[in-house]
Image (cartoon, rainbow, N blue to C red):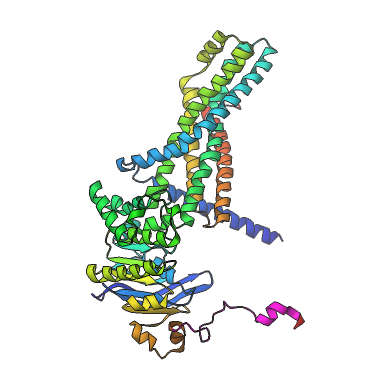
Amino acid sequence: MTRDYLRRLGIAGLTGFSNLGRATVLWARAMWGLPRWADVGLLTRQMYQVGVQSIMIIVLSAFAIGAVLSLQFYTQLANFGAQDSVGVGLALVLLRELGPVVTGLLFAGRAGSAITAEIGLMKTTEQLSSMAMMGVDPLHRVLAPRLWAGMISLPLLTLIFNAIAIFGGVVVGVHWLGADEGSFWSGMQNAVDIWNDFGKGMIKALVFGVLVSWIAVFQGYDAEPTAAGISAATTRTVVLSSIAILATDFVLTLGMYGNFGS
Amino acid sequence: MDQDSLIEISGLRFSRGDRVIFDGIDMAIPRGQISAIMGPSGTGKTTLLRIIGGEVKPDAGEVLVGGYDVCRLSRGELFELRKDIGMLFQSSALFTDMSVFENVAFPLREHTELEESAIRDLVLMKLNAVGLRGARDLMPSELSGGMARRVALARAIALDPALIMYDEPFTGQDPIAMGVLLSLIRRMSQALEITSLLVSHDIHETVSIADNIFLLADGKLIAHGDPQSLREHPAQDVQQFMHGEPDGPVPFHYPSDDYMFDVLGNSV
């Protein structure tokens, strides 16, 4: 019983490391040589698919999250008569954490799953094989534009998310609940550091962009070429991306804003 | 390497799990001729095409294509070699996000520096050859299986490769399209000296155009030669396959328990 359990644990560990190794080789091969001018059209099309088409869900979610945050901050801060500081809390929590993390999670659900399903279906219908047999490397033609598009799009979507969320916060905090508008903006301006808050948040977004597009592309390329295989791969993309984003966010926060214990 | 052979395979071994697909196969595909690989279902005919194209690596053996061992080429060298190989997939494998025209233009755009007008002319010529010039603006989802296969054939011959591999090219074709396809494959072989290697179960059609037939069974090459010599081959398994007989040394059924026992169980 114990031996069987250990054996299965060992197999799972080895499979995990083997997949990580294959995914790393795949990423390195796909990224090699790009971007070239000839691939700008492919990159643009993918940025439209994964970036522009994700804007609606980002905008709606950002407005709702900004509004809810503002509501919560206002309610709590009002206990201390500090409701005019809503803008400070809102900006810091969005720029440092929620902006990149929530955008990454939404991006994994909307664009990551689509990338996996598309590449998985191309594999199932032998489109990747036929491309390779024509002497065109699918790693460069299919995978690389999606990897680059994910890396570029996620920071841009995070910018949009932050802006809309702050707008949602203003609508609720200032225009509805009645926090002072001057204090709202000036507090935010004084508290936010362009590098420490905004810059580091953008670095997080870039890292999440690399992670999500890498996981999505590998899961699609590695999917079992059946309907059930594509379904399982799509699910794995969303689950693994979400875990990767949350775990990496913790590590990055620890590294960027360290000295929590001292 | 024999100057008259475009493909030379020696000592090829390949397994999937415990199942041996090829158990030491040697064969030479003559240059500029039409060769057919035939055999019962599941003998690895498609796998052999994929090994020749370098998509699948064998466990052992040497596969020379135009003098290059595809098993030992680097990824870049393999992709370079493939520019001179066309392959028609069993599933057609058209790019579903591109129109018929763009599918056929794809290899030309990727591998040549031709002007758009020249690409247009070439694509229309290739589509005309398969009778689908009028379907250039359709999407793959709007094509029947037979039409999709003809578009895939037009795409496979777009660059006039030295070798074209066809995986079941006749499946799903109506009698008219079948006649045109047979004549097209024959003309390309004779006029352009393209080497054609086809996998097919359609004995009548294959025998009518093939210069050589290689018959595979049980992981081995059991016979090869011109169609006439195979028809008159003394071996029983060759005769059974060439004449489509249900009874003979090659079983129709996948290995299984006794039929009566399987159905009635212990009540027998």
Where residue A158 sits: x, y (%)?
A: 50, 29
| The residue stretch that appears in magenta | B243-266
**Of B32 and A93, the residue lying toward us:** B32
Q: Is residue A68 left or right of residue B105?
A: right
Note whether residue A185 is visible.
yes
Q: Is residue B259 magenta?
A: yes
Q: Is residue B41 left or right of residue B87?
A: right
**Of B217 and B100, the residue lying toward us:** B100
> Residue shown at 37%/53% (left/top)?
B100
Which quarter of the rendered picture does the N terminus of chain B lie within?
bottom left
> Residue shown at 46%/23% (left/top)?
A195
Q: What secondary structure prevails in the magenta region? A: loop
Where residue B128 sits: x, y (%)?
A: 30, 59
Vertical comparison of B164 with A256: above or below = below
Where residue B51 sits: x, y (%)?
A: 39, 67
Q: Is residue A68 magenta?
A: no
Vertical comparison of B30 with B103: above or below = below
Quadrant housing residue A184? top right
